[in-house]
Structures are given as C-alpha cells and as structure tokens.
Image: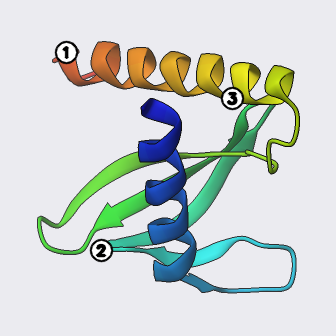
C-alpha cells in the first residue's frame, strides 16, 4: 500500500515542480519556494524551503526513487519509504529552538 501512496505523491510532486535549472534543482515544490540545496546523499536531496502560505522555513527531502522493475527493487523501495516516514514522524515530534 505504501508503495502506491509513494508513487502517487511522487507523481504529484513531479507535476507541481517548477525547475530552476538544467540539473534538476526545483524552484518550487507545491506551495514551498526552494531557497537553496542543503545537501544530497544516498536517499536523495535536501532543500531549505519557505512555506509560501505560512511564511515559515522548512527542510524538504526529495527521495530519489528509480522505477522499480524487479520484486527486489520493489521491496527496497518499500524499505526506503518506511524509513522516510519514520524520519518524518521523529522530526515532527521535535520541538526545540536549535532544531
């Protein structure tokens, strides 16, 4: 099930991105204005963004997911999706001025 949800969200993000240059750094994603790239790693890229409705800075992680062809790739994608959801839950629970 999470695989289907992730695929739909990925398609929605891809359709709502306004690209700022040729190398794939978006200018905006949905209602977030991308301010700068924070970094990248094995899972994808992280950006500093501004929530245009709330006027608040946030960090956005864009997960790199290639098309899953084999059953093994589908399982790996599900593991990555679950990991990202756990990270989001933990990050959302944090409430400290230094974070």
Residue receiving disc 1: 93
Residue receiving disc 2: 31
For residue 3, side relative to residue 58 (left or right): right
- N-terminal of the two: label 2 or label 3? 2
Q: Nearer the viewer, residue 91 or 96?
A: 91
Q: CA gap, disc 3 to disc 1? A: 25 Å
Badge 2 marks a residue whose secondary structure is loop
Q: Quadrant of the N terminus?
A: top left
Q: CA gap, disc 2 to disc 3? A: 26 Å
Q: Quadrant of the C terminus?
A: top left
Vertical comparison of 96 with 58: above or below: above
* Residue at the (80%, 50%) spot, across then down: 67
* Residue at the (32%, 13%) spot, across then down: 90
**x then y, percent, for residue 16:** 46, 80
Indicate the colouring scheme: rainbow
For residue 29, side relative to residue 50 (left or right): right
For residue 73, side relative to residue 8 (left or right): right
Q: Is residue 31 visible?
A: yes
Badge 3 marks a residue whose secondary structure is helix
Residue receiving disc 3: 77
Nearer to us: label 3 or label 1: 3
Q: Within 10 Å of the Cα at label 3, are there few (<14), some (14-19), or many (20+) other Cα atoms? A: many
* Residue at the (60%, 24%) spot, across then down: 78
């Amino acid at each position: 099930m999470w695989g289907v949800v992730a695929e739909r969200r990925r398609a929605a993000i891809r359709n709502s991105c306004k690209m700022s240059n040729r190398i794939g750094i978006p200018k905006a994603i949905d209602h977030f204005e991308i301010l700068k790239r924070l970094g990248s790693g094995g899972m994808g890229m992280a950006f500093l963004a501004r929530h245009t409705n709330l006027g608040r800075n946030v960090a956005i992680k864009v997960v790199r997911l290639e098309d899953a062809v084999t059953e093994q790739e589908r399982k790996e994608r599900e593991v990555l999706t679950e990991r990202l959801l756990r990270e989001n839950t933990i990050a959302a629970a944090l409430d400290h001025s230094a974070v």
